[in-house]
Amino acid sequence: MSDVTQLLQAASTGDPRAAAELLPLVYDELRRLAAHRLAGERNGHTLQPTALVHEAWLKISGDQQRDWNGRQHFFATAAETMRRILVDRARRRLAAKRGAGEVCLDADELDIPAPAPDDQLLAVSEALEKFAMLDARKAELVKLRYFVGMSFEEAAEAMGIAVPTAKQWWAYARAWLRVEMLGTVPGGSP
């Protein structure tokens, strides 16, 4: 059992030292994933990888006791938390831009990890929420790849699946999301 898994289990039982010892072990990986996700953001963006990691850490290590089911569960939660932070920021920015015009989305741009404009990020997030109701595991893969920027190998390891399975799930998820987004995005055809 890895040190990370042991510390996650200790944190689940309420050991306050465990979280303090866990952060240095996962920080570099979380920061690398955040940096990868934010690498191509628009000029002048204010969120830095370190800030994204810190904000995510504060949310996932808050006062609540968490029952971590190992490394996979932890990184899946971190991915979801980063996704929510980015989506919330995008919503706040777009709220100021209401009426700025329609933007057509090209679902082929989902060959991630490429940064997305705020409206595309929101469209993907909304479609992904619908997809998660149909297939939570495949939706989790999309979160790890799209919002965190994990490679197929990293995402497959985090989810405990084979790389070919991850690639099959990714192809299916992309197709489903494309159909969903083309039906709901301005300029898209049903």
Image (spheres, rainbow, N blue to C red):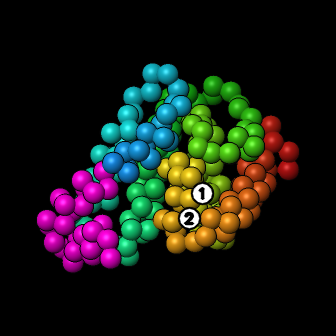
Residue 157 magenta-drawn?
A: no
Relative image position of residue 156 (x, y in whole percent): 56, 64
Q: Do the residues labelled 2 and 1 touch (CB within 8 Å)?
A: yes
Q: Which amino acid does label 1 sit on?
A: Phe
At label 2, counting other C-alpha atoms closer than 10 Å, the crowd grade (few under 14, some 14-19, many 20 or more) is many
Residue at x 38% of width, y 34% of height: 48
**Residue 152, label in figure:** 1
Q: What element carries label 2?
A: helix
Question: In which quadrant of the rendered image does the N terminus lie?
Answer: bottom left
Residue at x 75% of width, y 43% of height: 108
The vertical placement of 73 against 86, above or below, is below
Residue at x 68% of width, y 61% of height: 167
Relative image position of residue 65 (x, y in whole percent): 25, 71
Q: What range is drawn magenta here?
A: 1-27
Q: How far apart are marks 2 and 1 (CA)?
A: 6 Å
**Residue 156, label in figure:** 2
Relative image position of residue 99 (x, y in whole percent): 63, 28
Residue 70 sits in quarter: bottom left
Residue at the right extreme of this rendering: 189
Residue 9 magenta-drawn?
A: yes
